[in-house]
Image (spheres, coloured by chain):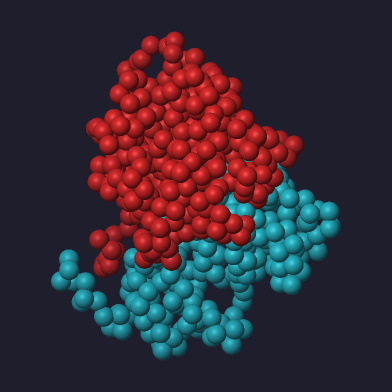
Chain colours: A cyan, B red
Amino acid sequence: MSDEEDDIILSELDDEELVAQMFDDLYDGLKEEIEEGVNILLERKWEPYDVLTKALVGGMTIVGNDFRDGILFVPEVLLAANAMKGGMAILKPLLIETGAPRVGKMVIGTVKGDIHDIGKNLVGMMMEGAGFEVIDLGINNSVEAYLDALAAETPDILGMSALLTTTMPYMKVVIDTMVEKGIRDDYTVLVGGAPLNEEFGKAIGADAYCRDAAVAVETAKEFMSRKHNQMAAG
Amino acid sequence: MTNSDALSRLLAERDWILADGATGTQLFNMGLSAGEPPELWNVDHPDRIRRLYSDAVEAGSDLFLTNSFGGNASRLKLHDAQDRVFELNRLAAEIGREVADASGRTVIVAGSMGPTGDIMAPMGTLTHESAVEMFHEQAEGLKAGGADVLWSETISAPEELKAASEAAKLADMPWCGTMSFDTAGRTMMGLTSAGLAALAGRLAQKPLAFGANCGVGSSDLLRTVLGFEGTNIPVIAKGNAGIPKYHDGHIHYDGTPELMADYACLARDSGATIIGGCCGTTPDHLRSMRAALETRPRGDRPTLEQITEKLGGFSSESDGTDGAGPAPRITRRRART
């Protein structure tokens, strides 16, 4: 097996083989290989948006599905997301330049009192991988920090994360404040974190609870398409 | 250190030990608000922390954890209290010592040490050295306050458990460690129950006991305990009292005292020696667990079917120990081995 490892020369693969190999390399978290693959596709005159969606998003979808199904775990997904980030760094300026379509925009942060950001970071990276613009507020966010970011960024989606039973009720504080200010319905609110469940998400007034990063991406896409349909209907 | 410490002596005397229940749930009921660090109450509301401990002791716990779960520098930094690690931990244990000594029986004060919340290198930024240093600082505070044993809990990364065991060694304290198996029967980082059992025997400071806490429901937790089979180290089971639900601004776990009594006996039958609850476990649950452990006879090691019959289904089909789980994608080159 180790003999074969060095034998793959990305530039010698045709487009289809190269994309398949990039799926594998994302799965294995190989950042340099992903960067090389992205550059080769760009040299072959691929549109940056196609490189993003067909190679990177396609590969991250496989990673996301295996994470959801308990086949891959956080360390593997962090490696894969890191490899994807390498590719994204090359694509980002080109995407802006070419005016590529954006799926949506999300503001995301861990709630006040909570330092845990593993899940939040995964969601952020996978959302970027799926074509969303992501504004990451980091950890320990107060109601004010969330509201300021909503006002400044006007995202489609607000994502909140908590990993502790002592911090998860703070999500309700944020949502209640949004209701008070009459801005709750301007955003899709998604919540996540180990101690949460669907029922809790509903009880606090979120639009959905997402059990992991893969589900978060699927849910976000679903809400975006609903929003587009509503706008088209209106 | 053999049998020179209180928990080793208790383990030699007894074939089951009742630990405590939830800390967070109880503190919310006493008025802790969301996002507030519970550790500051060791200074600001010592009466409430005393009540937290004595409620567990009066309900029959032989061992309780101190209010210091988030008492490491990384977590306290959020509240600008990173320079109060020693003080807050010492007080957490000191109040515990008073309660335990006043109980009139042997009650173990276990110094709780939760995760740092950071990801360890190479994936994250936390180095092994800084993790050891953080846990050691906390351990010294707990030791100074009179804790009988250090107790790492809700850990996900094997590297973090290793760092905690080294810190226990540096502090020259007996130590226990439990991990949270909340992701398809494994820890978030992918460690299986069998993986932890193998790891426990290799740690710098061999744990007096190891096991599982928190995670998903009580049935998942018992499946994890069954996965520790073959270890010669006493096993800890601290499962949640059901799943969290939200009522009028409060979190309520749906597991009844009756369910937790069944869980406690099944945990003993599954091989656990130190048995308690985690999130949602109130003194009422503990009383019911104690009564059941005292009065019900031991049974055979339960099957997975018997566990689901009594406690409900598992969150995932496989927990990665039966070889029946889905396999990873075969890739043409693999950097990781």
Residue B197 sits above or below residue A163 on the image: above
Residue appearing at x 30%, y 32% in the figure:
B4
Query: What is the x, y in percent for residue B197?
Result: 29, 40
Q: Is residue B131 left or right of residue B96?
A: left
**Residue at horizontal 35 percent and vertical 78 percent from the top:** A32
Inspect this view and state whether residue B292 appears.
yes
Q: Quadrant of the N terminus of chain A?
A: bottom left
At x 56%, y 54%, the residue is: B84
> At which x and y percent is residue A66?
41, 55
Seen from the viewer's position, the closer of residues B148 and B64 is: B148
> A69 or B133: which is nearer to us?
B133
Residue at far left of view:
A3
Viewer can see residue A71? no
Q: Residue B270 versus residue A34: which sits nearer the camera?
A: B270
Q: Is residue B242 left or right of residue B212?
A: right
Q: Is residue B295 above or below residue A71?
A: above
Rendered-image quadrant of the C terminus of chain A: bottom right
Q: How many marks?
A: 0
**Residue B238 location, quadrant:** top left
Q: Position of residue A118 (x, y in %)?
A: 50, 58
Residue B137 picture location, percent across and down: 44, 53
